[in-house]
Image (spheres, helix red, strand yellow):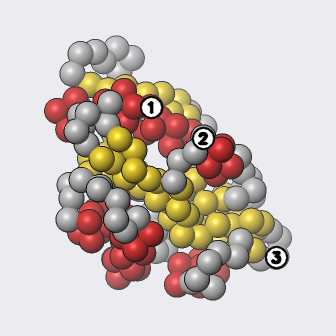
């Protein structure tokens, strides 16, 4: 098991409805030392790529993206969730359905912060059905920027997102892939990965 899988095993809580709760270290209270290790691992997995910008989505992607950005020495742009229906002109807009909150949000990124010269790494905390990622990917393509890769902290491999994104040909790296989890026993099974 890698450092992240060990931490998920120790502190993650399996809830009903395919939800893995990791709020004691990842998306409510945040273990910055762990985030730094996550950032270093992303840097290793995307070594040699000409990444000049990291793109994430608010809120829980931001902390991880910022620590990763330190290792890449690049700025972070986060897509903002917007309530307004009509945003035009200076914004890239995508629609994202939230897995945890079961609602639809428009997410927006200012055109000032993403352009065709950019080489983007997308980072997020979770990959479930892939809606959040599809929204971010569509923003990158609307901007005419190059998508160099996608770094996910925890992928739930039993949901459809990971397969869909890989089938589309993107370079997706998930630091921990949960293949099964049981809310009754609390048992979490990880997909084995190359060391
Ligand atoms: P997707 O769009 O891939 O279906 O879901 C991704 C988003 O939903 C993530 O950004 C994350 O915030 C949230 N999410 C999905 N599954 C889980 C989960 O099991 N636990 C937690 N804490 N968040 C999740």
The single residue placed furthest to the right in the displayed view is 184
Q: CA distance from mark 1 to mark 2?
A: 13 Å
Report if residue 106 is visible in the image: no
Instruction: Specify few, some or many for label 2: CA neighbours under 10 Å numbering under 14, 14-19, or 20 or more.
Output: few
Secondary structure under tag 3 reads loop
Q: Which residue lies under the disc numbered 2?
A: 168
| In the depicted structure, whether residue 180 falls above or below residue 50 | below
Q: Which mark is residue 185?
A: 3
| In the depicted structure, whether residue 171 falls above or below residue 88 | below
* Residue 67 position in % (x across, y down): 30, 68
Give left or right: position of 138 versus 32.
right
Residue name at image x 60 percent, y 40 percent: 168
In front of the other: 151 or 25:
151
Q: Which mark is residue 138?
A: 1
Residue name at image x 53 percent, y 78 percent: 4
* Residue 53 position in % (x across, y down): 26, 51
Looking at marks 1 and 2 on the same chain, the residue that comes earlier in the sequence is marked by: 1
The single residue placed furthest to the front in the displayed view is 48
Looking at marks 3 and 1 on the same chain, the residue that comes earlier in the sequence is marked by: 1
Q: Is mark 3 within 8 Å of ligand 1?
A: no
In front of the other: 118 or 174:
118
Residue name at image x 75 percent, y 56 percent: 158
């Amino acid at each position: 098991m890698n450092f992240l899988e060990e931490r998920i095993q120790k502190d993650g809580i399996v809830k009903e409805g395919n939800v893995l709760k990791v709020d004691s270290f990842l998306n409510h209270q945040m273990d910055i030392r762990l985030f730094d290790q996550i950032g270093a691992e992303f840097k290793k997995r995307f070594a040699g790529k000409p990444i000049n910008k990291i793109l994430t989505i608010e809120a829980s992607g931001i902390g991880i993206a910022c620590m990763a950005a330190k290792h890449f020495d690049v700025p972070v742009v986060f897509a903002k969730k917007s309530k307004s229906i009509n945003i035009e002109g200076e914004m890239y807009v995508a629609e994202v359905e939230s897995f945890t909150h079961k609602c639809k949000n428009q997410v927006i990124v200012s055109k000032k912060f993403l352009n065709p010269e950019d080489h983007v790494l997308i980072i997020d905390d979770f990959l479930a059905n892939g809606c959040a990622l599809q929204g971010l990917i569509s923003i990158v393509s609307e901007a005419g920027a190059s998508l160099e890769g996608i770094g996910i902290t925890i992928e739930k491999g039993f949901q459809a997102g990971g397969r869909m994104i890989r089938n589309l040909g993107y370079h997706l790296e998930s630091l921990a892939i949960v293949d099964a989890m049981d809310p009754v026993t609390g048992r979490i099974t990880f997909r084995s990965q190359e060391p």
